Image (cartoon, grey):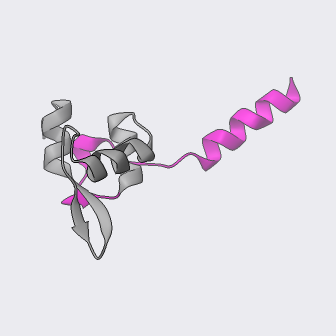
Amino acid sequence: MQALHSIEAREQATAPKFPPLAHETRPAVDTAAAAYYLSRRPQTLRGWACMENGPLRPIRINGRLAWNVSELRRVLGVAV
């Protein structure tokens, strides 16, 4: 049982820490954060961006994808 506990502890320690979407202050977030909020894998969001068929569209900043926080809130129905 000790090994199982250490695996769980390691996963919790290395899991990305994102604030609740209602408390997000940035105008846009990276793909990893957007995927976390949408409960999807980052590759799914990259596919949406490439095919332009997802529920929201990213903006591109210096060749990188950024996801508008207000659009994330709209899609998820999160009030500010």
Quadrant in which residue 55 is drawn? top left
Does residue 53 show up? yes
Nearest the eye: 49 or 5: 49
**What is the x, y in percent for residue 34?**
33, 47
**What is the x, y in percent for residue 41?**
44, 40
Is 3 inside the magenta-drawn segment? yes
Q: Residue at x 70, y 38 (%)?
A: 9
**What is the x, y in percent for residue 1?**
86, 23
Of all residues, the one furthest to the bottom in this rendering is 62
On-image quarter of the C terminus = top left
The correct choice, above or below, for 2 with respect to 23 in the image is above
Does residue 19 show up? no
Quadrant in which residue 38 is drawn? top left
Is 4 inside the magenta-drawn segment? yes
**What is the x, y in percent for residue 4?**
80, 28
Q: Residue at x 20, y 50 (%)?
A: 69
Nearest the eye: 13 or 28: 28
> Could you tell whether 25 is left or right of 45 in the image?
left
Magenta region = 1-30
Of all residues, the one furthest to the right in this rendering is 2
Of all residues, the one furthest to the top in this rendering is 1
> Could you tell whether 66 is left or right of 9 in the image?
left
Nearest the eye: 56 or 7: 56
